[in-house]
Image (cartoon, helix red, strand yellow):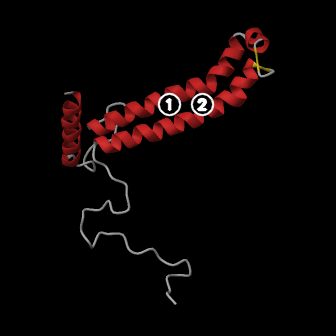
């Protein structure tokens, strides 16, 4: 039951996405004009908030409670060092993967294809054969 509703919703999103002329739409980061823009902006803001928390959280916590962040140790390192040196870069990497996954889900929901044959289906619009690295000369 839920799958049918989800598929119908996805099909509707794809169809409505294809009907939108994005070149005529105003791009406003605070008031997105299309459903795709709203969904994408929601993902961007969520990831940005998580990134700010992961990267600046340990530094802020150390400024607020330096004794606590120094007294607690992880693998022999003070918490402020471990969180900043290990947690922040790892968190940023995980957020990068999470963003890519969410963006792929959005692209699938709205029927956006970034593949090499993502043209209108016309043979004339198909990408040309890859050129040889020596300037395109075949020998």
Precedes in sequence: disc 2 or disc 1: 1
- Is residue 3 found left or right of 50 in the rendered image? left
Residue at 27% of width from left, 36% of height from top?
35
What numbered label is drawn on residue 18? none
- Frontmost of labels 2 and 1 is 2
Q: Position of residue 42 (x, y in %)?
A: 38, 30
Label of residue 48 in the image? 1
Q: Is residue 65 above or below residue 10?
A: above
Please tell me which residue is depicted at 53% across the width and 38% down the height of the picture: 96
- Label 1 secondary element: helix
Residue 39 rendering spot, x and y as whole percentages = 33, 34
- In the drawing, what numbered circle is on residue 91? 2
Q: Residue at x 37, y 37 (%)?
A: 40
Quadrant showing the N terminus? top left
Q: How far across and how far down the image is residue 131, in percent?
A: 47, 77
**Which image quadrant for residue 79?**
top right
Q: Is residue 95 visible?
A: yes
Which residue does the image show at 34% across and 40% down from the upper left?
A: 106
């Amino acid at each position: 039951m839920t799958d049918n509703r989800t598929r119908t919703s996805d099909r509707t999103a794809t169809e409505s996405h294809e009907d939108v002329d994005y070149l005529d739409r105003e791009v406003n980061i605070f008031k997105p004009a299309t459903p795709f823009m709203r969904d994408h902006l929601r993902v961007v803001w969520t990831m940005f908030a998580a990134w700010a928390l992961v990267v600046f959280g340990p530094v802020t916590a150390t400024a607020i409670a330096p004794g606590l962040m120094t007294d607690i140790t992880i693998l022999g390192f003070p918490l402020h060092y471990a969180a900043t040196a290990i947690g922040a870069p790892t968190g940023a990497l995980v957020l990068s993967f999470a963003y890519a996954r969410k963006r792929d889900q959005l692209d699938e929901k709205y029927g956006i294809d970034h593949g090499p044959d993502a043209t209108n289906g016309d043979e004339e619009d198909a990408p040309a054969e890859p050129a040889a690295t020596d300037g395109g000369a075949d020998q």
